[in-house]
Amino acid sequence: MAEDISGKGDPLRSLLLLWGKTEPGKRGPKSKVELKALVAAAVEIADKEGIEAVSTRRVAEAVGISAMSFYTHIPDKAVLIDLMLDAIAAGPVDAPMPVFDPARWRDNITLVATAYRDFYLQHPWALQVSTHRPVLGPNTLRAYEAILIAVDGLGLSEVEMDMTVTLITNYVFGAVRDVARANMVKRQTGLSDDEWWYAIAPFLETIDFSPYPTAARVGPVVGELYGLGDPDLAFTFGLERLLDGIAALVEARA
């Protein structure tokens, strides 16, 4: 299956639609369906069934128009994906821009990172979409502004601020992907992680682990504590280590 990629469609057409602008020289009859209704329908389908379930025909049917009528609003699925990503980027509609105290920067980054993680858990299909080229819509820029504010006032240069944001978002992306994968595996196999361990436990007891002494020592302790892994514990541990690294940079700049 081909990977869905943001920025794959006509970039100018995407930007015009993202910002609610009309192509020069183009004017047509007013449609009974608004663009945001199409995008909202696509997001709902993706949230429930995954990005692979989203098609121009499915979205058109969801809002009660023909597949051909869909193309009078959005040229193709590639542009639709750009619109979907931007629609969900800023979180709840009309949410106020956060106000951060630079003195509490660790709390600020923790808040932003946790919100970013919750975003992916709510819209796991976004993990499947390659976003090498940014979707420069109003909601995406608002989200970027919000996370930049969390690292502003720390004495970092503009480049260091942007790189710190990239560090945070890349960490969250990797951490939450494991959670989304675990949910997908449970859904597809019908087995929880605990049930899977119980199923294979008798065979594991027949294995000679002496060639792997470190694994034999660590594995049982970890398994007793949280099986295949407690995603909340792992996320918090990784984020704390990340914050420690940022703290070293902040102290060096101070």
Image (tube, rainbow, N blue to C red):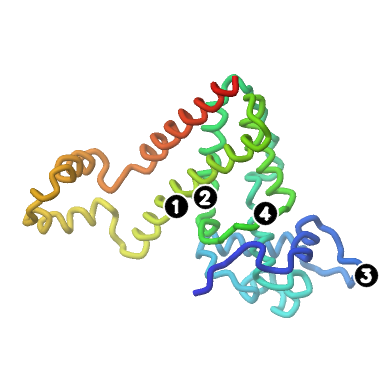
On residue 86, which mark appears?
A: 4
Residue 96 higher or lower than 37, as above or below: above
Mark pair 3, 2: CA separation: 39 Å
Q: Position of residue 49 (x, y in %)?
A: 50, 65
Residue 138 higher or lower than 106, as above or below: below
- In the rendered structure, the answer to whether residue 11 lies left or right of residue 160 reads right
Residue that badge 1 annotates: 177
Residue that badge 3 annotates: 25
* The one of 72 and 149 positioned closer to us in this rendering: 149
Circle 1 packing at 10 Å, graded few (<14), some (14-19), many (20+), is some
Mark pair 4, 1: CA separation: 20 Å
Residue type at tag 2: Tyr
Which residue is rendered at x = 70% and y = 35% of the image? 96
Q: Position of residue 247 (x, y in %)?
A: 51, 26
Q: Say what secondary structure mark 3 lies in.
A: loop
Q: State which tag comes first along the sequence, 4 or 3.
A: 3
Residue that badge 2 annotates: 120
